Amino acid sequence: MTSSPNTKFEGTEIAENDFFSSVASHDLERFHSECLAWLFNAFPDFANAFIQKFASKPGVFKRAFTEVEQLDLVLYYQVGAENRAVIIENKVKASEGQREISLEKAKSYFSDDVLKEELHARLVNQKYKLSQTEFYYLRGSAKKSFDDRFAHISGHTGIVICNDAPPESTAPRKTNTAEGNKGASSLVVLKKNCDFIFLIPANVDINRISPQINKKPAGFNKEKRNKWNLTTDPFSENKWTTITYLDLLESFITRESAAQELTADELLRNKQLLFARSYISFMFRQCDLWQAQLDNQFVNYNPSEYGASQYLEVLASLLMDRFDIKPKIDVISGSARNPEPLIHIEVTDKISVPAELFTSKSDTNPSPTFSLGVQIQGSRVKIYLSAGEHYDHIEIKSKQKYADFFWERLTQSNRFKQEGNNFSITLEDGRIEKLKKVNAKTKSFTDYCFHRSLFELSEGLDTKPIHAKELFIYELVQLLQTKCSH
């Protein structure tokens, strides 16, 4: 396929008049979902090549749909008379959000078995917390109504993806205005006949970064990049396979053929082909950019660039490998005020907190937990302390007193010291790192910041930045566990 005549595909230059470089900002997920749907519908051979490579049961492509009740992209195809689909969650920003569902809403979304067997432990204050992909997989159905024109062409009023064939009341609306379409039914695809794809811009090349980090993180699974926390059969297996945009493009075309000029006969036969090849060439360049940004995280971390969350996930996996007793470690998105991703660690659940510091919100009288968060914000690193997940179960009477309780425990160690608003930790190499206290404005009850340069180990011990961060966090967590547990 070809790009603009003024653009050299092999280079990094993008012509000023290149349409997609002007309008296709890399974080516009809906834009790229619509482009891919158009590409598959206009050129079914592309869709069939993609299905052949990524579907568990290849067949014949029929139609691509976007926004099937929040599902980004759905490729509908058939194997004989069997309806099947590839469901694609398009995460151009490579971050997955969380869904908080009320008990009442959950009853309409999920079956009784799911609520009782899988989600019972998630119910807190009459709400469930699920990742986006958990929500999309577990809910009973997703549907989309067709407009009259397409309903007439397809003979269906809409598409429904569901656990079981739905009763008529749950199907998309009837379309009676299209001539010859009265009484038409919905196109039904059973979830058991679907494959689930988590699409991201670029993925970590473990072999490439292992020389820098000296080992491969045991807990990092590059094939499963979505947030999947389900543990109970039959839902424990992560149903989503992660692929990159480069994987998608290379499933139906090579870089070389994308760069070839079209012949006059090809242009006459299909004028849309030029537009399609221009988009594909542009996306190949974008893939190179995304991969370069991701690779750069492991050399010079920049929390605002693409790949910061994957960088921290590798760091979290390396960190997890150090512990004999594994704390709960996760990488989560930041707040609206500081959107950079952060490492969140549930330090311990064996803390004896004086009863006068908190009030239980339930009859179970839970023991408070203690969380540590680490977030790199430009030139500074912030660590925060909070009551962890138990904000849903307990009410802190005084953030300051609650924080003081933990810091008093920590300063019993000769490695910790607090003077006024300053706090310091002595590392194993003898260096003393000073942290400055800042006002906590979120759920955390005390925040401390220090310059990012202090997050690196001194020269001669380990010149690899990721090791410095791993070791610093490990030492901090070890001391918290030792001094704050029973």
Image (tube, grey):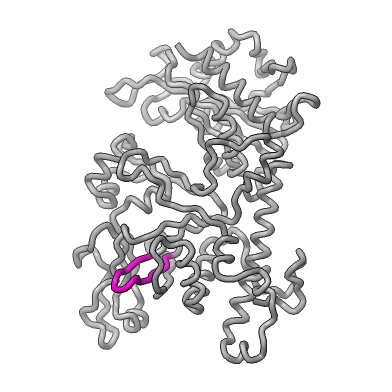
Q: Quadrant of residue 426?
A: top right
> How many numbered circles are shown?
0
Q: Position of residue 4 (x, y in %)?
A: 71, 77
Whether 83 is among the magenta residues is yes
Residue at 42% across, 50% down = 133
For the point 40% across and 19% down, which residue is it?
358
Q: Is residue 478 left or right of residue 213?
A: left
Establish if 450 lies above or below 480.
Answer: below
Residue 436 in the image, given as x and y percentages of width and height: 68, 24
Using the rendered view, name the quadrant where residue 269 is placed: bottom right
Residue 371, how many percent across, how many down? 50, 26
- Compared to 328, does 331 lie above or below? below
Q: Residue at x 40, y 25 (%)?
A: 395
Of the pair 351 and 11, the residue shown nearer to us:
11
Question: As displayed, is residue 443 above or below residue 66?
Answer: above
**Residue 399 within the segment the image draws in magenta:** no
In the picture provided, is 451 more to the left or to the right than 363?
right
Q: Nearer the viewer, residue 285 or 392?
A: 285
324 vs 471, nearest the viewer = 324
Please state, as top left, top right, bottom left or bottom right, where the N terminus lies in the image.
bottom right
In the rendered view of the protein, which quadrant contains the C terminus? Answer: top left
Q: Is residue 78 left or right of residue 224?
A: left
Q: Position of residue 283 (x, y in %)?
A: 63, 66
State which region is magenta: 74-85
Q: In the image, what residue occupies the spot 52% across and 17% down?
A: 481
Residue with the most extreme right position: 459
Please tell me whether the stretch drawn in magenta is mainly helix, strand or loop: strand
30 sits left or right of 172 in the view: right
- Res 323 → quadrant: top right
